[in-house]
Image (cartoon, rainbow, N blue to C red):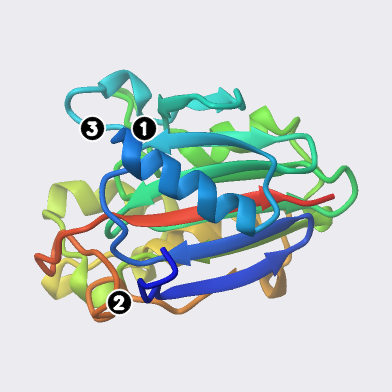
Amino acid sequence: MSATKLHFKAKSVGAAKVRFYGRMGPLGEDEKQRVAYHLGKNLGATSFCSILPANEEHPEAWYKVVDFEPGESKHAEAVVLKQPGQCCIFTSRDCPIVTISDMTSGLVGAAHVGWRSLRKPTSDCPSCDAGVIENLMAAMGHPYGENLVVYVTGGISAKHLVLERELLEPFWQKFGHDVSPDPEHRTLDLFRVIRRICVRYGVRKDRILSDGICTFETEWAGSKRANREGSNWTYVIKYW
């Protein structure tokens, strides 16, 4: 690894350290797992759990929050870290990773958040749904919003995320039309949606932060929509 130049973005967020690495490859392979754990140990982690995103082969993982289990690889969307040294490693391409740190309890929640996992539609009320962030807040015990700091890393910017109108309309109903900076071209701002959800939980706007990376425009980041191979890895480590 010492001969390989790694591109990354790092941030300390309350009780968590977050580090986003660009274009590291698939995490499910044994050799990649060894590399991932080696990097994590250098960051101060003592136990690891790999979170692989939900997909068509693992539909049960959408919106799912799992318990931290050392050495396990799980298809899920979120996890809660309770003990110092615990580290979850996410793979993503254009979907951001959201870290929620409770400054009082020290609990750290982390989630892989794409447009699909932000809302779970229901037949009777498309805008009354709950997605992965709501599920993560519940798994953290519905913490008091004033105690939380939120950090978003590694997502695609709104102008490159274009969805069909029928997919956007429930977001407009629930969060307002301004979550689409360019409604005519059917764009969606994931960070703005994430921020709206967190504010509704009482999180202060000045404590909802973003690294500003756009995976589409950042050459060293993997991006499905920009046709750049190589999954990004995001480490979230609880350090106190």
Reply above or below: 227 against 69.
below
Label 3: how many residues lie within 10 Å, few (<14), some (14-19) or many (20+)? few
Q: What separation in Å lies between label 2 and label 3 (alpha carbons)?
A: 27 Å
Q: What residue did someone put label 1 on?
A: 120
Identify the secondary structure beneath mark 1.
Answer: loop
Q: In this view, does 217 lie to the left or right of 226?
A: right
Reply above or below: 103 against 78.
below
Identify the residue at image location x=71%, y=69%.
Answer: 207
Question: Residue 229: x and y, percent?
Answer: 15, 60
Q: In this view, does 8 lie to the left or right of 79?
A: left
Question: Please, what is the three-letter code of the amino acid marked with disc 1?
Answer: Lys
Q: In this view, does 102 lie to the left or right of 114?
A: right
Q: What residue did someone put label 3 on?
A: 55
Quadrant location of the N terminus in the rendered image? bottom left
Q: What residue did someone put label 2 on?
A: 181
Identify the residue at image location x=36%, y=48%.
Answer: 91
Identify the secondary structure beneath mark 2.
Answer: loop
Nearer to us: label 1 or label 3: 3
Mark sitting earlier along the chain (2/1):
1
Quick check: can you spot residue 163?
yes
Q: What separation in Å lies between label 1 and label 3 (alpha carbons)?
A: 15 Å
Question: Residue 214: x and y, percent?
Answer: 33, 75
Question: Residue 43: x and y, percent?
Answer: 64, 59
Mark sitting earlier along the chain (1/3):
3
